[in-house]
Image (cartoon, rainbow, N blue to C red):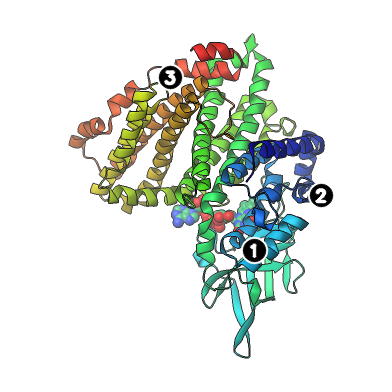
């Protein structure tokens, strides 16, 4: 268990270290040279130095036993500094995951203790040249080595692609096909037949080492088969997705905010047409505020999911997918908008936002692409829709209507409109059998993510009003600002669900001309349009908060 105090101290130590050792000029140099600062990564992972890895190693193996909430907090902070370095730390976490969830007690003791005590760097070897999103297409093999009728070891053959820490890790978990099915193995650096290529020349996260791995008759003893039973590999990989996707979600959040935290001060001092850009509504309400709103919607979902994982609700894969999808898409958009916000300066290396944009782009690809997230989300919630005969999202909406009755300012009524509209879109897709079009399925996945995040953010705002937020929750905004942000996002989500939901069902032939007007009413389109009233005033208010134009006392009175 990590206390709030310990977490704060760890984050502070990390920030102080980064300030001293990774100033902008150093980051720019390493980025230009495409170089992973191994000394810094080792320093961060060494138990007698920063020891970030200790946070996620269970206490019984010498770590601090941090939960999902702690990991989210640390990942966001790491991403704010540099996503490449953060990826190097993440890779050890990912690499040790199959061990944490699937290993025997002896294996856990051996490897997790070594991570905690020796600062061992790991890599996670799943992806192959022909097996990316579809890991079932795995081609690497692990053949049994049998002596006296007993399996004493395995010979691994194959190759892995784009493996983070691939060229620097001390050990690697490798997924390979055994006669009993896909299974994880631990392979140590230096094993005969195990080699890695030169680091990839990448678009972003150039401070992380990414390399292909090659295995030619690499022998490992049978005790390197994680869990000791063949065929558990894909189940073990699935078991932690909720958790690991939350980490990448936190990366998207941290990087997105890192970009905005450069754009916001810049726009205070940049004078154009006689006044700072921060005073121009057409600038703030396009480039800054909507990105803040989307990032905070994603944060609400991340925090809620982390809290639920820590409460023992299971691995929450779909919620992890929603968190990752929303935070990484929002982070990428925020970084892109930050380049725009800095104009020509934003397009140069010196101002850093273009580096952040290149870096954050990977979060939409690794640990499951955005399209795979859309599919995961849609398939799961589709089952809920079917099982409840279309009631699932109507019932969720009713909960937010109740929340609106007790907390009328947090946008819960508008979130409810989004959820009702979503239920109608899904029902229409069911009746007209539209999910045979993969495009419909995936677009609905996006709408689900928006509608659920709208609910989450309004709930978060209500908890903040009641002083019941998680003790480690981010407190960047006060309750008045957060409820305004929640209303802004709920409006966006409701309009998106209605407009894009209508587009996709009509586009797939699910609504005839004569049904159109009635369907729009069933979806609640007129109410969703009416709910847009007040949007500009709310955007004005969020801008005023971001630019320090509202005193805290005035906010409390608002
Ligand atoms: C910098 C970097 C670091 C990485 N680190 C690691 C690591 O440490 N360990 C590791 O194992 N892997 C790692 N990866 C691999 C990463 O997880 C994969 O790139 C990712 O899962 C996508 O696989 P792919 O690249 O083969 O793309 P593909 O699966 O070929 O996908 C290509 C495109 O098609 C879409 N697509 C795929 N399937 C479908 C479908 N069924 N329906 C519709 N659209 C689809 C995808 O969304 C994507 O847009 C890393 C990759 C990079 C670039």
Q: Earlier in the sequence, mark 1 or mark 3?
A: 1
Q: Residue at x 24, y 30 (%)?
A: 521
Residue 108, which numbered label?
1
46 relative to 522 in the view: left or right: right
Structural crowding at the residue carrying mark 1, measured as other residues with C-alpha within 10 Å and reported as few (<14), some (14–19) or many (≥20): many
Is residue 399 visible in the rendered image? The answer is: yes
Count of numbered marks: 3
Q: Are marks 1 and 3 in contact (CB under 8 Å)?
A: no
Seen in the picture, residue 470 relative to 427 is either above or below; the reply is above
* Of callouts 3 and 2, the N-terminal one: 2
Residue 202 visible = no
Dot 2 or dot 1, earlier in sequence: 2
Residue appearing at x 68%, y 40% in the figure? 78
Which residue corresponds to the image point at 69% horizontal and 52% vertical from the top-left?
63
Q: Which tag is nearer the camera, tag 2 or tag 1? A: 1
Q: Secondary structure at mark 3?
A: helix
Residue 228 in percent (x, y) is at: 58, 73
Q: Position of residue 491 (x, y in %)?
A: 40, 27
The disc placed on residue 39 is 2
Residue 161 lies left or right of residue 376; in this view the side is right
User: Can you identify the residue that label 3 sits on?
Assistant: 535
Is residue 440 depicted above or below 342 in this figure? below
Q: Nearer the viewer, mark 3 or mark 2?
A: 2
Give left or right: position of 78 versus 37: left
| Front residue of this view, candidates 262 and 280 | 262
Contact between marks 2 and 1 (CB within 8 A): the answer is no
Q: Residue furthest left?
A: 514
């Amino acid at each position: 268990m990590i206390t709030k105090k310990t977490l704060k101290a760890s984050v502070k130590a990390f920030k102080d270290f980064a300030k001293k050792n990774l100033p902008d000029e150093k980051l720019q140099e390493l980025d230009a040279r495409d170089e992973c600062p191994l000394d810094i990564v080792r320093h961060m992972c060494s138990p007698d130095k920063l020891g970030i890895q200790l946070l996620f190693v269970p206490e019984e193996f010498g770590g601090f036993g941090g939960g999902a909430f702690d990991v989210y907090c640390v990942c966001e902070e790491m991403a704010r500094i540099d996503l490449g370095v953060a990826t190097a730390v993440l890779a050890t976490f990912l690499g040790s995951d199959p061990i944490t969830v699937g290993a025997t007690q002896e294996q856990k003791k051996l490897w997790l203790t070594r991570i905690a005590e020796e600062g061992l760097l790991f890599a996670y070897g799943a992806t192959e040249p022909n097996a990316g999103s579809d890991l079932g297409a795995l081609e690497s093999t692990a053949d049994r080595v049998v002596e006296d009728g007993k399996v004493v070891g395995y010979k691994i053959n194959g190759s892995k692609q784009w493996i983070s820490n691939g060229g620097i890790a001390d050990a690697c978990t490798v997924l390979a096909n055994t006669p009993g099915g896909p299974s994880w193995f631990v392979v140590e650096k230096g094993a005969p037949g195990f080699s890695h290529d030169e680091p990839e020349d990448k678009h972003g996260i150039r401070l992380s080492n990414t390399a292909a791995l090659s295995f030619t008759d690499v022998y490992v003893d049978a005790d390197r088969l994680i869990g000791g039973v063949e065929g558990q590999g894909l189940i073990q990989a699935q078991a932690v997705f909720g958790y690991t996707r939350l980490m990448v979600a936190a990366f998207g959040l941290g990087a997105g905010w890192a970009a905005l935290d450069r754009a916001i001060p810049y726009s205070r001092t940049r004078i154009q047409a006689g006044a700072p850009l921060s005073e121009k509504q057409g600038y703030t309400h396009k480039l800054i505020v909507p990105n803040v709103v989307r990032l905070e919607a994603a944060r609400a979902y991340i925090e809620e999911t982390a809290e639920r994982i820590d409460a023992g609700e299971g691995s929450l894969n779909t919620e992890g997918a929603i968190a990752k999808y929303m935070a990484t898409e929002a982070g990428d958009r925020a970084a892109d908008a930050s380049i725009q916000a800095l104009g020509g300066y934003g397009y140069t290396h010196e101002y850093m936002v273009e580096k952040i944009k290149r870096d954050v782009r990977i979060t939409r690809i690794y640990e499951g692409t955005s399209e795979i997230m859309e599919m995961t989300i849609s398939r799961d919630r589709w089952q809920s829709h079917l099982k409840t005969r279309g009631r699932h999202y109507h019932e969720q909406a009713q909960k937010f209507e109740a929340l609106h009755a007790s907390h009328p300012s947090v946008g819960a009524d508008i979130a409810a409109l989004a959820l009702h509209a979503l239920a109608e879109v899904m029902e229409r897709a069911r009746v007209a059998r539209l999910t045979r079009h993969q495009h419909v399925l995936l677009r609905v996945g996006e709408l689900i993510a928006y509608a659920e995040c709208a609910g989450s953010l309004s709930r978060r705002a209500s908890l903040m009003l009641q002083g019941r937020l998680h003790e480690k929750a981010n407190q960047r905004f006060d309750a008045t600002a957060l409820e305004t942000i929640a209303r802004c996002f709920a409006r966006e989500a409701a309009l998106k669900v209605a407009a894009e939901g209508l587009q996709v069902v009509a586009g797939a032939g699910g609504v005839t001309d004569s049904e159109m007007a009635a369907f729009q009413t069933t979806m609640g389109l007129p109410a969703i349009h009416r709910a847009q009233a007040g949007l500009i005033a709310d955007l004005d208010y969020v801008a005023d908060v971001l630019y320090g134009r509202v005193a805290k006392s005035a906010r409390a009175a608002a």
